Image (cartoon, grey):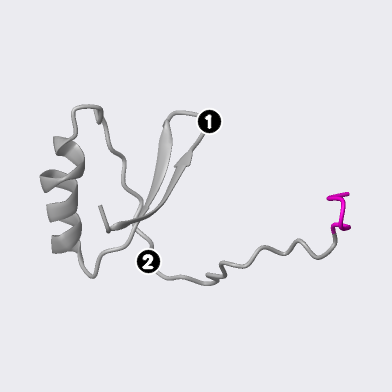
Amino acid sequence: MPEVVGCHPVAGEADYFLEVVVPDMERYRKFLVGKLLELPIVRDVRSNIVIQSLKADTSLPLGHFGPDGT
């Protein structure tokens, strides 16, 4: 599914957190109803829609760790 750009197992009420990128709500509806909910392992979906991205940086700030990871 090319719409899914990230998939993360999580603790709490949900089992997974999917990051989905689509151009508009109609495409999201088609993805949700036509693909995701058609999977036999998917029983429930809760959606959170991003209104605005205030910061979206893919680099990780790990410079404070030494070469051995400490």
Residue 31, x across and y down, in percent: 18, 52
Q: Nearer the viewer, mark 2 or mark 1?
A: 1
Question: Which residue corresponds to mark 2?
Answer: 51
Question: Which residue corresponds to mark 1?
Answer: 11
Up the image or down, 61 lies above or below 69; here it is below
Name the amino acid, label 2.
Ile
Up the image or down, 58 lies above or below 40; here it is below
State which region is magenta. Answer: 65-70
Residue 49, x across and y down, in percent: 34, 57
Q: State the SS at label 2.
A: loop
Residue drawn at the location 83% of the way across and 50% of the way down: 69
Magenta part, dominant SS: loop
Name the amino acid, label 1.
Ala
Up the image or down, 53 lies above or below 64; here it is below
Dot 1: few (<14), some (14–19), or many (≥20) neighbours within 10 Å? few
Q: How many marks?
A: 2
Residue drawn at the location 16% of the way across and 62% of the way down: 27
**Towards the viewer: 4 or 50:** 4
Question: CA gap, disc 2 to disc 1?
Answer: 24 Å
